Image (spheres, rainbow, N blue to C red):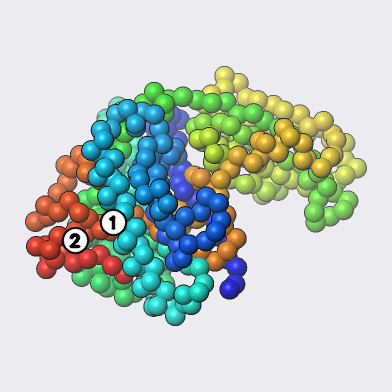
Amino acid sequence: MGNIVLCVLLFGFVLPTLSDKHSLYYIYTALSKPITLPGIYEFTALGLLDDRKLDYFNSQNQTKVPMQDWMREKMQADYWDKGTQSRRSKQQWFKVNVDILTKRMNHSKSDLHVLQWRHGCEIKEDSDGIQFLKGIDEYSYDGQEFLSFDSSNSRWIAPVQAAEPTKRKWDDVSILNQYTKGYLEKECVDWLTKFMDYGKESLRKHTPPAVYAFAKKSVTDSNKLTLTCLATGFYPKDVTMNVRKYRTSLPEDLLTSSGVRPNDDDTYQLRKSVDILESEKADYDCYVHHSSLTEPVITKWDGKCNDCSGEKIQSAIIGGVFGVLLTLAVVGVIICIVIRTGVIVDKNWSKGPRRYQPPNDDCSNRIGGCCSCKNLKPKCPIHSF
């Protein structure tokens, strides 16, 4: 079995304070078979509000649970009971569809494959009220783009040939596309604004970054050092970092950036590095600005080179958790699985505010965005691949 490095970004998406943008996303991940790695389950579902874990479900515990104290306090037991049942039904839905895709692509069942689904919405809040920015409904298979919903035209986009049968099948069901569009633009926004109100105190908390400057031997050139600036432990995720030489910022095209990544405590980290001559004695520093700061943090490199494995640095770097991404320009909890795996995402989780109601649809048992009620099967077939 060939190895595949699958990095899944379990969302992080918002600049809640600086730009007044907010997001709500759900990521569902399913494996074609169980694997014996700690913390990796055959099926998981994770909700994220402004990059923070909202709720969680896995195939071992079989219960949807809150990940924020305010969710536990505000949402009634009925909400969690219905959410648990929804997650369990989606677990079965994904099991069926992983099998469908494995057969369609002539993949061996002895190998590990992953199906993932991410869906949700982003809004902007200003003096005029709430403005819908975008909705995302995307699937990936083995870490590659598989299918996505074009909300503007109410149709599915198939970037690979293997997704064409699914695209044709789903586009032929107009009620499904109506529901998907309505969920992204209205129902999701309702939930997002509701959760924002419930968790407003937590979401407003700002945490300043800790900033480090250190160097180690370059792995590509024995005559050079790799100088790194690390900012970690900050929230929200919007941050500015410059690597400076004699107080002049180096061009970004000379730097290697990790991008903003999530830590496991709902904060973020960012690293930027540059290779310099080992004999160089220039003054380098890290310049970091964040909304939690009244003035930028400037941390000067001490000019020393070491193995960079000290407890202080290592503990700061090891915060990020790695996972599997669809195709999204967002950040979240990252989990890198060095195996051939697959991921799934689900989109309907439990009942909530419903300004939007699809036509002729009173079904509360939804699977993959469509209902499975027997009396509605002619109009709303099971939403399988």
Q: Mark 2 = which residue?
A: 372
Q: Which amino acid, mark 2?
A: Ser
User: In the rendered view, would you say 12 is above or below 140?
Assistant: above
Instruction: Estimate the x, y position of residue 15 in percent, counting from the top left.
Output: 45, 35
From this viewpoint, which residue is outermost toward the bottom? 106
Instruction: Please report whichever mark, 1 or 2, sits nearer to the chain's N-terminal start.
Output: 1
Location of the N terminus (image quadrant): bottom right
Q: Residue at x 35, y 52 (%)?
A: 119
Task: Specify the label residue 28 is tagged with.
Answer: none
Whole-percent x, y for residue 39 in the image: 52, 50
Residue 44 against residue 127 in the figure, above or below: below
Q: Residue at x 42, y 26 (%)?
A: 202
Q: What secondary structure is marked by label 1?
A: helix
Rendering coords of residue 84 (x, y %): 30, 47
In which quarter of the view is residue 289 placed?
top right
Please rate how many residues cluster around mark 2, counting C-alpha atoms within 10 Å: few if below 14, some from 14 to 19, many from 20: some
Read off the residue under disc 1: 89
